[in-house]
Amino acid sequence: MAGFAGGQLQAGVDGTPVDPAAEEVVSAFGVHQAGITTAQQRYATFVAADLTITDGALLRRLLADISATVALVTQGQEPPPSPMFPDGAITPTDFATGLGAARLTMTVGVGARVLELPGITREAPRRLRPLPAFAGDHLDPRWGGGDLLVQICADDAQVVSAAMRALRARLPGYAVIRWTHSGFLSAPTGGGTPRNMFGHKDGTSNPRPGSAELADIVWSLPDEPAWFAGGTYLVFRKIRMKTASWDLTTRDEQDAVIGRRRSDGAPLTGEQEFDQPDLEDTGAGGAPVIAEDAHIRRAHGFSMLRRSYNYDYGFLTAMAGGSPDPLEHPEDHPHAPGTEDHHHGGHGKLDVGLLFCAYGNDPDSQFVAAQHRLAEHDRLNTFIQHTGSAIFAILPGFRDGGYVGDTLV
Ligand code: HEM
């Protein structure tokens, strides 16, 4: 991940927790949109919508309205009056009143179909292609695709929710929501790399914030259409993590699966988290210390900015009859000695995992190449299942007075 600013809660005068970071504002304006290289906030909701409009002029109106909303709510202010009810017939519900901006960012992307709308004359971003199928995919179409994406992130979950409501109010007549996902991510006390739902530090080998490497990997390449300068691509994957199986795996095997120690994030060949993994190092009998099928060996050499969030939907998905199939037989696993065989208490159906986000300027050589290699062979595959998938062109940034996408339409 790009970095993490997890504010420590302090006691206020009356003893209630006060978060000093709550007032912090991230500017919505700039060459690039906020929310990409912004130090990762604690909470995120991803909203994908399908357009119901059929021409570019209406798209312009929608993007301008969303931008006006983003410009205000990211500063902790109320959204502008709705263009549908300019006479104030409806008012926004003020459930974020009194809360700070909490580093709220709202990042807008478009799917391939948007570039085909009548009235859009600009060339499509060159690398906005549908993702191929990967071995082992278990995709639920309800959790994939979309014409429009807004990634909403903040250090306060209520602020994220309020921003989502403000966004939703702009959509009727233009678009319908297709899917949403919500996640969280907390840095350890004292800071450092957050852990994923398997307990490993996740994001260690990301390009460093502010580095030239990060800029080279993320921002649009020179051969892209001029209007897309400053944009990027986002590959989104909902990846279910089979926590029941993982928890029945020894710590040593868990570390071997990743190639890093769960305790401190260090590579199995090193002492500290940020030591370079030594993929040549061998141990007893000449076997590589970082196994041939360890996740970090398989993923090594592919550059991207991973800005993912954990999610925990518990049994909600199974109860809703979605995917994973609630009737799916849970995997066999050993039971504690002396206990009766049991009906698994449903734990095989927990929907917990990673809202995996890969930002980059060349999805084919970055995410797609990496995922083909991982899907083919990765010891982690026993424990995970990709269940949602989407790709978006993330629009360039915009300036005060402009709107997101103003170079496009
Ligand atoms: C639930 C699924 C996944 C889990 C639990 C997971 C976990 C991890 C962990 C713990 C690390 C080591 C720490 C770090 O450098 O961040 C890592 C590294 C990495 N992962 Fe994943 N990962 C998952 C899926 C993916 C996917 C789908 C991709 C891309 C297609 C990917 C690409 C990478 C890359 C590029 C690295 C850095 C490898 C290096 O050291 O050079 N991961 N992952």
Image (spheres, rainbow, N blue to C red):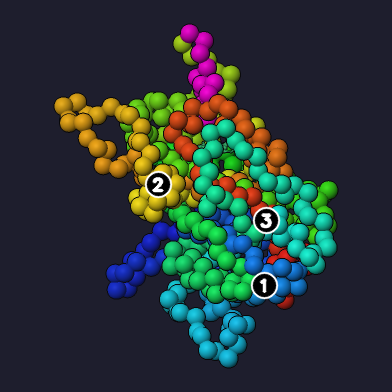
From the viewer's perspective, tell me whether residue 309 is left or right of residue 70.
left
- Near mark 1 (Cα within 10 A), the count class, few <14, some 14-19 or many ≥20, is many
The structure residue drawn at horizontal position 57% and vertical position 47%, both measured from the top left corner, is 389
- Near mark 2 (Cα within 10 A), the count class, few <14, some 14-19 or many ≥20, is many
The structure residue drawn at horizontal position 81% and vertical position 51%, both measured from the top left corner, is 224
* Cα–Cα gap, marks 1 and 2: 34 Å
Q: Report the residue marked by disc 2.
A: 351
Q: Quadrant of ligand 1?
A: top right
Q: Where residue 290 sits: x, y (%)?
A: 51, 23
- Magenta range is 285-295
Look at label 1 and name its amino acid: Leu
User: Mark 2 or mark 3: which comes first in sequence?
Assistant: 3
Q: Where residue 172 sits: x, y (%)?
A: 58, 73
Q: Report the residue marked by disc 1.
A: 62
From the viewer's perspective, tell me whether residue 343 is left or right of residue 318.
left
Do we see residue 90 in this rendering? yes
Q: Is residue 262 above or below residue 98?
A: above
Residue 41 vs residue 315, the one in the foreground: 315
Q: Determine the secondary structure under disc 3.
A: loop
* Cα–Cα gap, marks 2 and 3: 26 Å
User: Mark 1 or mark 3: which comes first in sequence?
Assistant: 1
Look at label 3 and name its amino acid: Gly
